[in-house]
Image (cartoon, helix red, strand yellow):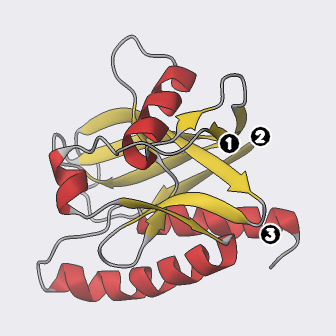
Amino acid sequence: MVTFTVDLGGYPAGGSVSRRTAVRGIIRRGGEYLLVAGKYGDCKFPGGGTEEGESLKEALAREIREETGYAMKPGSAVKWGVVTERRKGMLADILEMDSHYFFCQVEGPAKEQVLDEYEAEYGLCPVWATLRAAWEQNCRAEAEESARRAQGKEAILWVTRERKVMERLLEDSGAV
C-alpha cells in the first residue's frame, strides 16, 4: 500500500489540529480516468470527507455518485493507499487530512451530480482524461496557485495532493 505526506505549510508551529478522513476513487476505463475538473483547469479524483457512521467504502460510493453522477460498481473498491495532508486549517490552526485512495469501477450511465454549494460554485464537473493530461493540467494550476494566494484569491486546496498522486500512479505504470 502506498503512503506519503503532503505538507503545504502556512500554519503556526505547535498550533491546534483538526483531523479529517476522506476517500478518493481512482477509476480507469480504457486509457482514461474519471476525474472532476474545476474552474481553474485543475483535476481531482472524485471523493470527499466521510460522514459519521459511514465506512470508507460507503463514503466512496456516495462521493463518486454525488460528484460524477456515476454509481460505483459494488465490490470493486481495492485500496491503493493513504495520503496524509497537512495545511492551514479553518476550524483549527492545522488541518491533517488522511485521504484513502481506492481503485474502483463505475457502472451505468451517469446521472445528475449532487454538489455541495462550494462544489457548484467551484464549477466541478466530471471528465474522462488520460492521467498524463490531468497531471499536466494540475502542474499548470499548481504553478499559478502561489500567485493566486499572494493576491488573496481563492486557493485550489487539493491541487498539490492530486498532482503528487497522479505522479505516483504514472511512475508505478512506468509512464514517467
**Residue behind mark 1:** 81
- Tell me the SS state at disc 1: strand
The three-letter amino acid code for the residue at tag 1 is Gly
Cβ atoms at labels 2 and 1 below 8 Å apart = yes
Check disc 3: other Cα within 10 Å, few if <14, some if 14-19, many if 20+: few
Residue at the image point whose x is 34% and y is 22% from the top: 51
Residue at the image point whose x is 80% and y is 79% from the top: 176
The three-letter amino acid code for the residue at tag 3 is Glu
Q: Nearer the viewer, residue 133 or 74?
A: 74
Compared with 144, 1 (above or below) is: above
Image-based side of 94 in relation to 107, left or right: left
- Tell me the SS state at disc 2: loop
Residue 41 placement (x, y as % from top left): 39, 78
Q: Is residue 22 visible?
A: no
Residue 103 placement (x, y as % from top left): 70, 42
Q: Is residue 16 visible?
A: yes
Compared with 96, 50 (above or below) is: above
Residue 83 placement (x, y as % from top left): 57, 47
The three-letter amino acid code for the residue at tag 2 is Met
**Residue behind mark 3:** 171
Residue 1 numbered tag: 2
Q: Nearer the viewer, residue 118 or 140?
A: 118
